[in-house]
Amino acid sequence: MAKERWASRVGLVLAMAGNAVGLGNFLRFPAQAAKNGGGAFLIPYIVAFLLLGLPLMWVEWAMGRYGGQRGHHSAPGIFQSMGRSPMWKYFGTIGLWSCLIIASYYLYIESWCLAYALWSILGQFRNIADVNPDYPSEFFEILTGETANHLIAVSPWGMLIFAVCVTINIYILSRGLARGIELVAKVGMPLLILFAAILAIRGLLIDPATDPAAKESPFKGLNFVWNPNFESLADPAVWLAAAGQIFFTLSIGMGSIHCYASYLREKDDVVLTGATTAWTNEFCEIILGGTILIPIATAYLTLDVVQAKTASGSGFGLGFMVFPTLFDRWGWFAPAAGFLWFGLLFFAAITSSLAMGQPVMAFLQQEFGFRRDRSAFAFGLMLLPLALCVATLTSKTFSDEFDYWAGTVMLVVFALGEIILFAWVFGMEKGWEELKSGAEMWVPKAFFYVMKYVTPVFLLAILLAYVFKPAPDWGAYLHQVRQSLGNGEALPAWQWADDGMIGKLLHVDVSREREAALAKNAEARDKVLHNRTLSPEEQAEQLNKLDQQREEIERFWSRLPIWRNIDRLVMIGVYLGLCFLVFTAWSKRRVEGRA
């Protein structure tokens, strides 16, 4: 089997940057900045980039190139080539697992971007800002089939778009590195940057003096993104959020960078190329991402409203449910603006989703001799049952759980394992020489010590913070502790956070959301009982509907933990299945004398 190579360095950098540049650059980063002190968020963000992101980026590039020279193009083999214990290949299997699990829901979100882009260019969001501002949300419900308090969420049209996206990805992957992934990156990344630049410039031209729909200058939002609120730096939650964003934005900790780097030659540079990839991603995230979502939304909604809408740390609702109505203010340019926005999100998504399929395919090709087209088809078959669960059930089941465990927690676990392997098992001295081999850029010696000591400790602290996270977050809880100690009072009661690992395992978020839904229902019922304008028949009809809604709430939230436990068993089953494939592959290697 001929060994595949990247056709050019530019193609490699764009493919790697495409892997890193995803939806989080344009949706999550601006929302995280809005939630965590505006410009002050950039300080812990840059610190996390220097102590966590860039070192891990270099480590993954170096590990990938090293493993590739020994015939491995996926994390199990790459990890095993650097570790003494045979168990390292099973730890590396987390890389295959993460790519498969994340792809199953990421491709679904990718299909939403495509659907919104097509609906925008067809002019279906025109003239809705004043007539029906909720139409983008209604369109999303039609697209996904999501209904409150219902487990099943099926949309035939949404499933069709999803199938189209999966097919496009499988086809591109089947064409190989140079004619598939690299070609898409060479086209998609420049278009993404062009689309983003057009929107950013047009957004900054919004003038309240000439645009009657504008309430504030977009520069107020831009200044908020860049001007720091230093008080937020004392909040540990801000630093945790910044470190978490680095994982989201650089696509580290999931095995895709290892795979891409494994196709390099022995003396190909990984330092300058890896750094260029990281800088390209940061440009897209900080410069472009920070200049679109918050400034445009601020101009039409005001900064206070934008901060309220991004309080959860996600810009998804703002980007999908609100932006089409804001573009509607741009007259004839509105359909094109919507297409540019959702088009750039689609390009960001597809260049990332392709990077999730390649490691699984590389494993099947390398270990079982699959042809390129057959491995792409096999990846599609492995993806299908997981994707169907995501696309046919409410997002509160498989989609949310996949995102939390594979797209958040296991990224940190995998990164912690790889830095220990690189710096302490393989050896930092050997690792440093491997990193510098063929380097076209000088690496400060300080990074030697950062990689060996600082990065592992940083990752361990992040992991422990996720595991034991209190409600509502570390910053608020520690503030309560300081107040209690200062007043000579007892320490505040410990409660698990909804998004902490232990809180998730105990379904704390389910209990709290159930109580909130029941309280809202009770409030609505109380209003009906005290509404003197209703006739007895109307009152009885509304109360009956609310009673039915209450039953639906009780039934849905009581069943949700069961489905989440099923989901977790599925994830464990997928990992064990992949471990079995790895075991089979190495048994085959031993028989052939290649182990």
Image (spheres, rainbow, N blue to C red):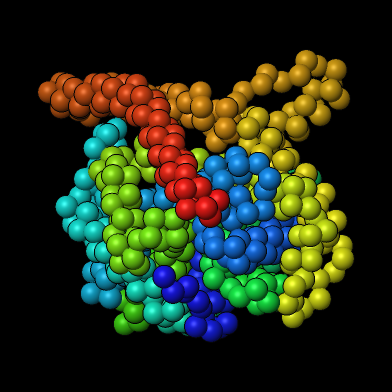
Query: Where is residue 448 drawn, in percent x and y?
Result: 83, 60
Give whichever of 414, 288 is nearer the camera: 414
Please tell me whether residue 513 is drawn above or below residue 351 in the rendered image: above
Q: Residue at x 57, y 76 (%)?
A: 13
Please tell me whether residue 587 is drawn above or below residue 282 in the rendered image: above
Give whichever of 274, 107 is nearer the camera: 274
Number of marks drawn = 0
Tell whether 25 sits left or right of 231: left
Tell whether 304 sits left or right of 237: left
Query: Where is residue 385 drawn, in percent x and y?
Result: 28, 44
The answer to whether residue 568 shows anywhere in this view is: yes
Quadrant of the frame with the N terminus = bottom left
Give whichever of 195, 324 is nearer the camera: 195
* Residue farthest along the left direction in this orientation: 537
The answer to whether residue 254 shows anywhere in this view is: no
Determine the image quadrant of residue 124.
bottom left
Please tell me whether residue 63 is drawn above or below residue 191 in the rendered image: above
Q: Residue at x 40, y 27 (%)?
A: 565
Tell whether 536 sits left or right of 590: left
Query: Where is residue 302 drawn, in percent x and y?
Result: 53, 61
Tell whether 60 sits left or right of 581: right
Query: Where is residue 221 drawn, in percent x and y?
Result: 59, 66
Q: Residue at x 54, y 60 (%)?
A: 72
Q: Residue at x 30, y 66 (%)?
A: 373
Please tell me whether residue 267 is drawn above or below residue 570 in the rendered image: below
* Residue farthest along the top direction in this orientation: 490
